[in-house]
Amino acid sequence: DDIPCFGGIQYAFINPPLLDIDFTGLANVADFSMIYDTIRSIMNDTMASMIVLPNRMMTKMDYSSSFLDAYVPPVGVARITVMSGHGFKIQKQVLRKDDIPDVYVNVTLGSSKWKTSVQKDNCTPTWDESGDFLLSDKDQILTLHAWDEDKGPLDKDDDMGVAQVTISEILLAGKTMEVELLQPNKKGTGSYLTIHCDILNLTTTAPETGTTPSLTEKPPARNHLGGLVTILITGAYNVPVKKEKASSYIKVTYGDAHEFVTGIVVDAPGYDALNPLFDMAFHVPLTSDLVAKCVGVGDLPSVVLQLMNGPGTGDGKDQVLGSTKITYKDLMHAPNQTIQGKREIGTNGASVECMVSLSYLDVGSVSTPSERQLTASSSKKLTSSSSERSGSIEDTASSVTPSLDGAEAATDIAPAVSEDQEQVKVTMVKGYGFKTRKPKKKLFGKADVPDVYCLVKFGSKQQEWRTATIKNSITPAWNESQTYVLSHRNEVIQVGVYDENRKGEDYLHGHIRVTVGQVMLEGGTMEVEIEKDSVGIGAYIVVNCEVV
């Protein structure tokens, strides 16, 4: 009967807001284009550093709550591949040679950007080039801006159009999508780009298990990330200055290219200037350029924290009250490559509460060029396919299959599909977490290792299909598929998970229920816990959805 309580609220813009500023009176001079653009750029940068993802602001309702508990890590890394383009047009010229476009694309997500190569004299350019972005939310907008490169001293590059799409839209399209470039007036240009998105997880497991991580020996490819350094600053304690002169902050340095500062805390009602709370997070993506500087050195840069006191104007007059260093080797020897807690900062009794962690990029799920090409072609040609099966199975014809609705189930369904309908291939990949069951009647009987199969129902269709039974396995693998007409992304996949018994009724482990959209937003593959009577049983089914 207790009222649900929460310790604080975090808030942020998923994407940078559009600012429309109108200066009046004497300030009307600022409406001139150059001044207006400069002011808006400064305001955008300031907002982005404070309240645009991955940066968040936090309001504590309970001051004893910890920012370390409230911190929301990145979703992962979005690897965007610009595959190809078509529809670019030759510009007719008078008294000189026609201009065949030299196309390149600027790709932007959040505050990060990378550029493709220039494809010379080509109306149907092919790049197949990729770059990584730290992803905080799947509704972040990806911007693709195509340009025609001009080499003349007075010639600016020609704007070929802009396309914007969210990461979730690409995932829901099957990870590969064709987008039209738009003019500034939002009219289509007739030019298109084909893009692909893979979502990569961040992990504390080193790239080569059991050996010294090879990140500094083999840097990531151009525009790719090798990992992420996360730095959380909670607060400082026992700042060694007089309370009325306290104006403290933490300066964070990583290598020679990354410098951050927390907010400044001064003596004011409601604030403890000698034990200031900062509650800020900083992220350092391990880019190819950053890692390349460390090749031959053997170590990545150290994280240096400095306790500062002063106005924070950057004029060099601020006082350094103490510093502490967390080296790459410190992180490598720490549990989960994470150092967390209070650390002495200087020799005057001050300390800082922080968390520093090192994570790597799990590249095991990256699509190959041939897989991306197959996905791109299959998104244009919709085909019907029957159930695909593989793995170690046994014939199950001797048992009666129950139905999710209580009737006998149908199997090997091949739906009739017209070529203009979108389809989705649903695959029951595998399961894990199943347990052996003790026999009910025999005291010393042999434990029952489950013989697991799945009974699958898609959307409102009454027909069901059944996977093969994987005998005597607590980690069954099916890799069996069925293709369905996809009316919308909210189509529900219902799966009953059973243990086959040759004598008597099959034992129901439980059910899973998930929409196609939910699976697609997880990159096309999702682990779903089996529930029985609305309670999770600790076993999972891995489901894959692929738009074909």
Image (spheres, rainbow, N blue to C red):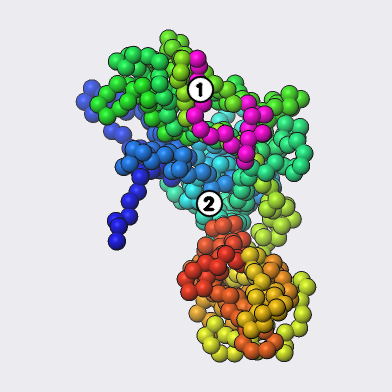
Can you tell which of label 1 and label 2 is closer to the viewer?
A: 1
Question: In this rendering, is residue 308 above or below 72?
Answer: above
Residue 367, horizontal then vertical, whole percent: 69, 53
Q: Is 268 or 368 nearer to us in this picture? A: 268
Is residue 332 a member of the stretch shown in magenta? yes
Read off the residue under disc 1.
344
Side of 545 relative to 208 (left or right): left
Residue count near mark 1 (Cα–Cα under 10 Å), binned few <14, some 14–19, many ≥20: some
The tag earlier along the polypeptide, 1 or 2, is 2
Question: In this rendering, is residue 218 above or below 510?
Answer: above
Residue type at numbered disc 1: Glu
Q: Is 91 or 369 nearer to us in this picture? A: 369
Q: CA distance from mark 1 to mark 2?
A: 42 Å
Residue 18, horizontal then vertical, whole percent: 38, 40
Is residue 397 a member of the stretch shown in magenta? no
Residue under the point 45% across and 20% down = 350
Q: Is 356 or 10 nearer to us in this picture? A: 356
The residue stretch that appears in magenta: 327-347
Residue type at numbered disc 2: Ile
Question: In this rendering, is residue 501 above or below 71?
Answer: below
Secondary element at image label 2: helix
Which residue occupies the extreme left position in the image?
25
Specify the label residue 167 is tagged with: 2
Residue under the point 57% across and 46% down = 76
Residue 332's image quarter? Answer: top right
Specify the label residue 1 is tagged with: none
Are the residues flagged by discs 1 and 2 in contact, CB closer than 8 Å? Answer: no
Quarter of the picture containing the N terminus is bottom left
Residue 140, horizontal then vertical, whole percent: 48, 47
Residue 412's image quarter? Answer: bottom right
Residue count near mark 2 (Cα–Cα under 10 Å), binned few <14, some 14–19, many ≥20: many
